[in-house]
Image (cartoon, grey):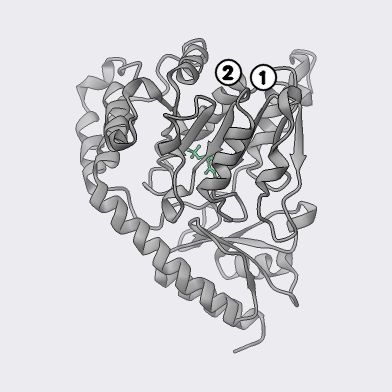
Amino acid sequence: MSKFWSPIVSRLTPYTPGEQPKIARLVKLNTNESPYGPSPLALQAIAREVSDSLRLYPNPDAEPLKQAIARRHAADGVSVREVFVGNGSDEVLAHAFHALLQHGKPILFPDITYSFYPTYAGLYQVEYRAVPLAEDFTLRSEDYLGHGQAIGGIIFPNPNAPTGCLLGLADVERILQGNPERVVVVDEAYIDFGGQSAIPLVQRYPNLLVVQTLSKSRALAGMRVGFAVGHADLIDALERVKNSFNSYPLDRPAIAGATAAIEDEDYFRKTCNMVIASRTALAAQLAGLGFQVLPSAANFLFVRHPQHDAAQLAAALRADGIIVRHFKSERISQFLRITIGTDEDCGVLVEALRRHLGQQ
Ligand SMILES: *Cc1c(COP(=O)(O)O)cnc(C)c1O
């Protein structure tokens, strides 16, 4: 604390990102990064931009990237005016809080969810109500109905994080229909690993904002690109906030690399399918070791062992050079969130767990 701080600064609760350890030869399964590299075409496009052109400002609207995203979703009627891009989906989400959820009324999100939501709520002074997930950690769409104009909006990840549980599209649509006067933000950071995106609903629901990222399924976490698809009026609001904050959130290599990554559908499908296959195999192996494994539609598993303390298991794995994520919050303190690595990574993890569980 300092006398120089604006009053809000001491009231903030900043988000704590998963650790990026400096140890070499680590099995890093803690922040849901892709175990495979970005598309080779994306890397080539990035390399081409690392040139004399860097003396010039980038395109402020990241036009080529918006066009590539609109083209990819053209069958769902998406046009460039319905696409917003930002410096990681975290920035897109922050602008959504600022531009679309700040109405002087509490917003709703699940009690167990992406921990950046309460942080943004604090930053933008948006009140919120944490809606408890069901006992089995699924989101009940009925909990988000019947609030009328007493709420300021709704946001949830689908699949949810850190549980991995998927909400079916019919339930997403129910929430949209039940809240025609409020914006519903669906954070689809993990949708490419087996879920059905809500993007096809955008043409019918002007209150829907779908947010996606290139950090997970397109292996570009280090480059920071995310986007939103929604009615042009919602996108306009995001653009107004963005242009009051930073005209150039995406640099030249990011625009070029992200555009190429979106266009390389084959590499995208291949790597997502590899992650899904590894997830199925790892879930079965962990169940075989006695873990309860929540059904996951994401690139991670959320697991608990009835006889072993999660924090102790995480510490034991860490000593082996295997990093997984453990959250201290009450309802989930006995769970571990494990990112799907390569099959080799998963094998190393399973062997270590077998040792720690005394099942060698
Ligand atoms: C990873 C993640 C994001 C943020 O991703 P960016 O790297 O900022 O694009 C957003 N929402 C959820 C639920 C996530 O897990």
Residue density around tag 2, few if under 14, some if 14–19, many if 20 or more, within 10 Å? many
Percent of width and height locating residue 352: 57, 77
Name which residue lies at 61% across and 40% down: 156
Query: Distance of mark 2 from mark 1, alpha carbons?
Result: 7 Å
Q: Is residue 287 above or below residue 14?
A: below
Q: Secondary structure at mark 1?
A: loop
The quarter holding residue 64 reads top left
Q: Is residue 339 above or below residue 126?
A: below
In the picture, the disc for residue 197 is none
Asked whether, in this view, residue 25 is left or right of residue 142, the answer is left
Mark 2 and ligand 1: say if the CB distance to the nearest ligand atom is below 8 Å: no
Name which residue lies at 48% across and 62% down: 340
Where is mark 2, residue-wise? Answer: 99
Q: Nearer the viewer, residue 344 or 153?
A: 153
Q: Name the amino acid type tagged 1.
A: Gln
Where is mark 1, residue-wise? Answer: 102
Q: Nearer the viewer, residue 136 or 148?
A: 148
Asked whether, in this view, residue 243 is left or right of residue 56, the answer is right
Q: Name the amino acid type tagged 2.
A: Ala
Contact (Cβ within 8 Å) of mark 2 with mark 1: yes
The quarter holding residue 70 reads top left
Percent of width and height locating residue 262: 29, 40
Mark 1 and ligand 1: say if the CB distance to the nearest ligand atom is below 8 Å: no
